[in-house]
Each structure stands twice: as C-alpha cells, then as structure tokens.
C-alpha cells in the first residue's frame, strides 16, 4: 500500500520523439504523496500531465531562452522531458494537482478518502 | 472470470528491456556532450550536482545559460575571478516534518560550477536573469576584446 509509484519505463515503442528522463523525488506527506520533477525551461503551458489506466504521465516541453551569438560550449540536451509512473491504487487519480515553479514540477497525489474494501452482498 | 491481473500484451516482453532504455539514455548523453564535460556529468553520481551549462558568444557579449531547476534567486551566487565565471549555491531541503522520502533522485546541497571565459569581460556590467529554472548570465565583452573594423586607408 505504501508503494506509491512503481515507475514504468517504456521502451519507446515506435515513438519518433526522443525524451529525456528528468530526476524526480517522491515524498510521503500527511494525506498522500508529493512528487517533484525537475524540468528546467518548461513553462506552465508546456506541461502535459495525464492519468490513463492508472498510469501518470508527465511530459514537459521546453521553451528555451533565445540567446544571440554562437554556441561555443554545450552541456544541455535539446530533448523534451517525459516521465511515467504507475499509481498506487490508494491514490485518488481525480484529485491530483500540479504546479510548476522555476522549472520544478510539484504534484500532490492525495490518497482516496475511502480506501475501504467493498462489501458484496450475496443475493 | 479472470482473476489474474491483466497485462497489456505488448508491455510484458518489454519489461526486461526497460533497464536498457535508461542505459541508452546515459550512453547517449555521453556521446552528445563534449568529451571533457562528460566527466563533470558522471562526477554527479559521486560528488553531487553539476548543473548543465551552455556558453554562447556574440560580438558584444558572452552568455552563460545554466539549468538550475527549483531554486530561489537568492540562493544563487555568481562571481567572476581571473577570467573564470563561477556559479554556486545551495539547494535546501524543504520542510521535513513527518515526511518520508520514498525515492530521491533530486540533489540537495551545495553546488559549484566554473567555466573559463573565452574573452575578457567587463565585470561591472554583468547581468543575470532567472526564469523557468534557467539562469542566464550576460557578460558584456571588455572594450579591447570586441571585434574591431579596421579601415584600409
């Protein structure tokens, strides 16, 4: 139950676009989890977060600052960011919220209020 | 009735290859970068955080662009010494009360990055901006380092 997120790293099946996997951290907080992902150069509208089949996908598209002049030394990589996590069943997928500040995406993943076993009556 | 958890047919055979995709990422990054800078990056595994730095040069300026996600402006120090630009700072761990880190790939602590500048710059006119986690330092070239047109008389 405490294994929030098992990461699913898909071998990019037939995907044309290459992504880089940004560093992330998962912290357990009072009523859920907090997920932080580093995406420098990504603005709010470049961020695409989706939950599908219990999989949380975060894609960040960069809008890099334009700099005049020629590049004389490069360490950054041009690809966009993408990270996929499998959600623990205790997480309420509808209540996930996200914000981005200075290239750091912070998602709050609250646990569902009633993570109770369902009772099935025999008719 | 199906009691076994359904697995997408195409995901199963790939799971063994998952680790290869991260390895490939790593290898690609080595090839993508200039030889010596890849040392800085692999050093990250052992010594801490070495933010990626790009350097641009135009007629009037030298511009350094550094990826520093999730910092506060006040936590970044920029200094110039002997023709080298140094960017340092400290990323602090945010509140830790009753929280348990389950997985942490983000680096917390101090970092320091230096790069020798290709030309002399005017230290009094250096300016910097920090947006979307990217620090951009603009260093105007010193008068004597600017390209000059010489008229043939």
Image (spheres, coloured by chain):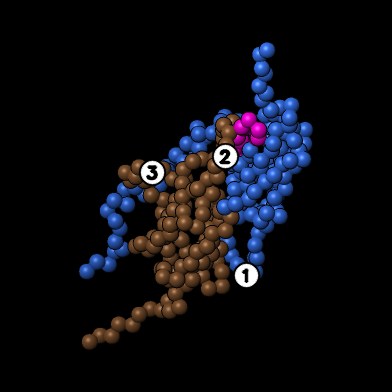
**Which residue is found at the position 56% from the left and 63% from the top?**
A27
Placement of the C terminus of chain B among the 4 image quadrants = top right
Chain ID for brown: A
Which residue carries the number 2 mark?
A67
Q: Main secondary structure of the magenta part?
A: strand
- Label 3, secondary structure: give it: loop
Q: Position of residue B32 (x, y in %)?
A: 50, 34
Say which chain tag 2 marks: A
Count of numbered circles on the image: 3
Q: Chain of mark 1?
A: B
What's the chain of the residue with tag 3?
A
**Tags 1 and 3 in contact by the CB under 8 Å rule?**
no
In the shown orientation, is residue A67 left or right of residue B88? left
C-alpha gap between disc 2 and disc 3: 25 Å
Q: Is residue B132 above or below residue B55?
A: below
Res B69 visible = no
Numbered circle sitting on residue B120 = none
Q: Quadrant of residue A29?
A: bottom right
Residue A17 numbered mark, or none: 3
Tell me the residue at 24%/66% (across/down). Answer: B2
Camera-near label (1 vs 3) is 3
* B27 or B68: nearer the viewer: B68
Res B54 → quadrant: top right
Chain letter, blue in picture: B
Magenta part of the protein: which range? B53-62
Circle 1 residue: B98
Numbered disc 1: secondary structure? loop
- Residue B60 is one of the magenta-drawn residues: yes
Q: Are marks 2 and 3 on the same chain?
A: yes
């Amino acid at each position: 139950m405490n294994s929030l997120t098992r990461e699913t790293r898909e071998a990019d099946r037939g995907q044309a676009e290459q992504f880089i996997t940004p560093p992330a951290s998962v912290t357990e907080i009072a009523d859920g989890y907090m997920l932080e992902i580093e995406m420098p150069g990504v603005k709010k509208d470049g961020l695409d977060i989706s939950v599908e089949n219990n999989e949380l996908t975060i894609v960040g598209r960069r809008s890099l600052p334009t700099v005049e002049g020629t590049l004389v030394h490069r360490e950054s990589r041009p690809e966009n960011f993408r990270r996929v996590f499998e959600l623990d069943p205790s997480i309420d997928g509808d209540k996930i919220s996200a914000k981005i500040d200075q290239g750091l995406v912070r998602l709050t993943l609250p646990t569902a209020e009633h993570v109770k076993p369902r009772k099935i009556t025999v008719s | 009735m199906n009691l076994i958890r359904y697995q997408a047919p195409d995901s199963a055979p790939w799971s063994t290859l998952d680790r290869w995709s991260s390895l490939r990422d790593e290898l690609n990054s080595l090839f993508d970068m200039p030889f010596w800078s890849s040392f800085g990056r692999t050093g990250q595994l052992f010594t801490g955080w070495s933010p990626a730095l790009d350097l641009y040069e135009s007629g009037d300026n030298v511009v350094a662009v550094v990826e520093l996600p999730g910092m506060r402006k006040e936590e970044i120090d920029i200094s110039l010494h002997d023709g080298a630009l140094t960017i340092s700072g400290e990323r602090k761990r945010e509140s830790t009360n009753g929280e348990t880190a389950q997985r942490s790939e983000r680096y917390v602590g101090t970092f320091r990055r230096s790069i020798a500048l290709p030309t002399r710059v005017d230290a009094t006119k250096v300016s910097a901006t920090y947006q979307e986690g990217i620090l951009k330092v603009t260093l105007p070239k010193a008068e004597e380092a600017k390209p000059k047109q010489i008229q043939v008389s």
